[in-house]
Amino acid sequence: MTTLRFARVAAAIAFVAVLAGCAHPIAIQAEKTPERVEATLSPKKVAYVMTDAERGKQVITPGGGGDRVSYYPYRDLEKALRDTLRSVYTDVVVVPSAADAKALRESGASLVFTPEIITTSSSPSPFTWPPTQFGTEIVCRVTDAEGQEVTRVRVNGKGNAEFSEFKSNFGLAANRAGTDVAEKLSAEIRGNPKLR
Amino acid sequence: MTFRLRLVAACMATLLASGCAQLMAPSYSSDYASLDRLKTTRPEKTSVATFQPTDPNHAVNNLTLRGARLKSPSGSFAKYLENALIGDLKEISVYDPDASTRIAAVIQHNEMAIGGMNTGEGLMDVELTVTRAGTERLRKIYQARTSFESSFAGAVAIPKGQSEYPNLVRTLVRNVYSDPAFIAAIGK
C-alpha cells in the first residue's frame, strides 16, 4: 500500500469513526398511553415527582454498528407516566420534590410517586445505528402525604423494531417499550390494594 | 478497487441510517408544571379554533433538517400546535368545543436551525388571540427560542433537530400558560 493510499484509507476510516463515536439522538416517547375511563377512576388526587434536573438528564446507551444513542428518559416519558397515573386516579399533579412538605400539602395529594427510569438498548446490526431492541424499567417509590413509604412498584417494558420499519422514526423500538411499560405500570397500580 | 468499493459501501450504510429520509416529529408532551399552575387559576371553559395556516405547503408547515423533511404527525405543524392546546385544556378539564371563550392562533415562524457546527436552535413565533362571545380579550405574539447541542455531522444533527421539535412547542406553550395576560383572558 502506497503512502498516499494509506493516508486516504486512514482519513476515510477516521471520518466514519468520528460519526460512529457520536451518540445519535432519538426520542423515546410512548407510542400510546393507557386509556382514561372516568367511570373506573379512583377518586384520589396523587402527585408524581419530577425535577428539571431529571428532565434535562441525558442518557447514552448502545445502538447498532458500535454506535450509541442518546435521549432524555424523564423528559420523553413524563407524558406516559402522567397519562398512566391519570388512567387510575381522578387528579394528578407534578411536584418538584418529594421532600417539599409544603408543596405536597398545597397539592392536596394523598399519594406521591417518585419514579426512577432505567433504560437499555441494543441492535445486532453491524452497519446501522438505530436500536432494534429497547428496554424501559420504571421503579416507583410511593409515599403518603407525610412522606412515609406505602409501597414500591417495579415494571419492565420491552420494544422491538426491524430496520425496515425505521422510515421516519429511529426511536421506534424505544417508543414501543414506552407503550409497554406504561400499560404494565397502569395494571400494576390498579392491582395493588395499597394504591387504590 | 474491491477494497475501495467495500469501504464506500460501509460509509454509505453508516450515513444512510439517518440522512435523506422523511422524518416524523415526535409527539408533543406538555410542560406539566405550568399546566398545573394554570389549572389553579380556574379558567373558564375554552374552545380552540382551527390554527393557521392550514395550507400544508406553507413555509411554517414545511420544515427541513439539512434537506431532510420533518413531517408533522398531525399533517401540518399548525394542527400539531392546535392538538397540543386541545390536549392540554382537556388535561385540566377546561376544554369545551362549544365554549364562547375561544383561542385562535397563526404560526408566523417555525424553524429548526441545525446548520451550526456545535449548536442547533428552535425558533417559533405565534400570534395568539383569545375572544369571548366574539369580543377580543387578547391578541399577542408569543415567541419560543430553544438551543441544543448539535454537530457538524448530519447523522447526529438531523435526528437531534427531529427529537427537539416537541421541546420547542413545549417552550412556546409554557410561555403562553405563564403569561398573566393569557391567564386573565381565559379567566372568569
Image (cartoon, rainbow, N blue to C red):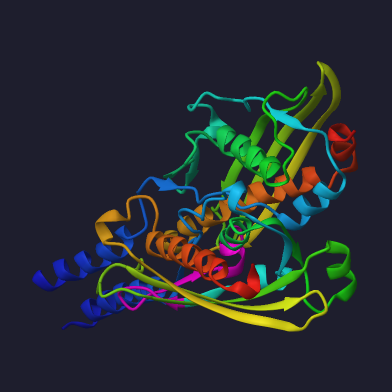
Q: How many marks?
A: 0
Q: Nearer the viewer, residue B169 or A152?
A: A152
**Which residue is rendered at x = 59% and y = 33% of the image?**
B78
**Which residue is rendered at x = 88% and y = 64% of the image?**
A106
Q: Quadrant of the N terminus of chain A?
A: bottom left
Q: Quadrant of the C terminus of chain A?
A: bottom right
Residue A19 position by quadrant: bottom left
Residue A144 in view, yes or no: yes
**Which residue is rendered at x = 66% and y = 25% of the image?**
B49
- Could you say where residue A70 lies in the image, as x and y percent from the top left? 49, 70
The magenta stretch spans residue A67: yes
Q: Nearer the viewer, residue B181 or A129?
A: B181
| Residue at the outermost left position | B2
Residue B151 in view, yes or no: no
- Could you say where residue B52 lies in the image, as x and y percent from the top left? 62, 26
The magenta stretch spans residue B106: no
Q: Nearer the viewer, residue B54 or B94?
A: B94
**Which residue is rendered at x = 40% and y = 61% of the image?**
A176
On screen, B21 above or below A51?
above
Range shown magenta: A61-79
Residue A138 position by quadrant: bottom right
On screen, B129 above or below A151?
above
Q: Is residue B88 left or right of residue B20?
A: right
- Could you say where residue B104 lies in the image, as x and y percent from the top left? 71, 27
On screen, B144 above or below A78?
above
Q: Nearer the viewer, residue A8 or B128?
A: B128
